[in-house]
Image: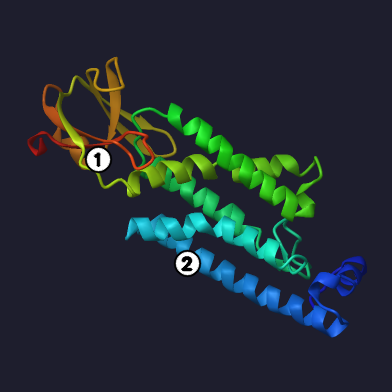
Amino acid sequence: MPHAPASALLDAENDPRLGRTHAERVSALGRARKIAKLCRGAMYVACAWLAVWPEPYPLVFTVVAALPWLAFLLCRKYRGAFAIDNPGRGGLRGDLTLLLAVPTGVLALRAVIDSHLVIVGPLFLPALAIWIALVGCAHSLGPGWRGWRRLPLLVLMTFPYPPGAIAIADQVFDFEPPVSLLMPVTGKRAFSGRGRVLYLRVPAWGLRRRPNEIEVKPDLYSAVRVGDAVCLQVHPGALGIPWYEVQPGDRC
């Protein structure tokens, strides 16, 4: 057994969900810690894969997006053996908290980098529904999240998951042909914050009914001058949320 408070050890020893005898309960906790360690290792590999080289994108995205739900499943199926409420280093149960926290951050990062939605409004309702489900599952399966003091941390930890997962899924599972629009470039802007973001200014198109800016990659930004044209490819989105990508003008 790892070092743990006497009260926690007593709770584990007396938890009937873990087995009928003390030996069975200790064995169940040991197996759960080993499984949790394997899950965390697999999570680090999958999240690094998605963050650094997301190919094939649909596969690695699906693996990473499923990790929080895998943690919920294990906590529900083997109640008492796993924890998702950050029990700390001395916890006796298999700690799966990172399966909720790390994928959320990586999905949000990839969505910021890769997703270019035409409008973000359609994200709101499905993201809210998934976020409520996440918080509800964590709240019911992790007793440590039920106190009001820790609720803000849970909210912060889970909030980026729904919009990030929806935006990426809408894009990587969209196999419909796009609509191509040849758009004149009326201006350029480079924004330097935590990362350099490059924009081209174009006239109104589609759901954007006023002149607007579209994000582009550095090579295209460098090659295009004001007055040139770019090919704006508008995709319908696998989830019905239109997104776009920008190509050189000769692609239209």
User: The residue tagged with tag 2: helix, strand or loop?
Assistant: helix
**Residue wearing tag 2:** 45
Residue 176: percent from left, percent from top: 24, 43
Residue 167: percent from left, percent from top: 41, 41
Task: Specify whether 11 is left or right of 173.
Answer: right
Q: Residue furthest bottom?
A: 23
- Residue at the spot x=86%, y=70% of the render? 15
- Residue at the spot x=19%, y=38% of the render? 220
Callout 1: 10 Å neighbours few (<14), some, many (20+)? few
Kind of residue at disc 2: Val
Q: Give residue 201's quadrant in the image.
A: top left
Q: Sequence-wise, which precedes: disc 1 or disc 2?
A: 2
Q: Is residue 53 above or below residue 235?
A: below
Q: Is residue 121 above or below residue 1?
A: above
Quadrant containing the N terminus in the rendered view: bottom right
Q: Give residue 147's quadrant in the image.
A: top right
Residue 19: percent from left, percent from top: 81, 77
**Residue wearing tag 1:** 218
Q: Nearer the viewer, mark 1 or mark 2?
A: 2
Q: Alpha carbon of mark 1 to alpha carbon of mark 2: how far?
A: 29 Å
Task: Specify whether 83 is left or right of 128.
Answer: right
Residue 101: percent from left, percent from top: 60, 53
State the residue in front, 64 or 52. Answer: 64
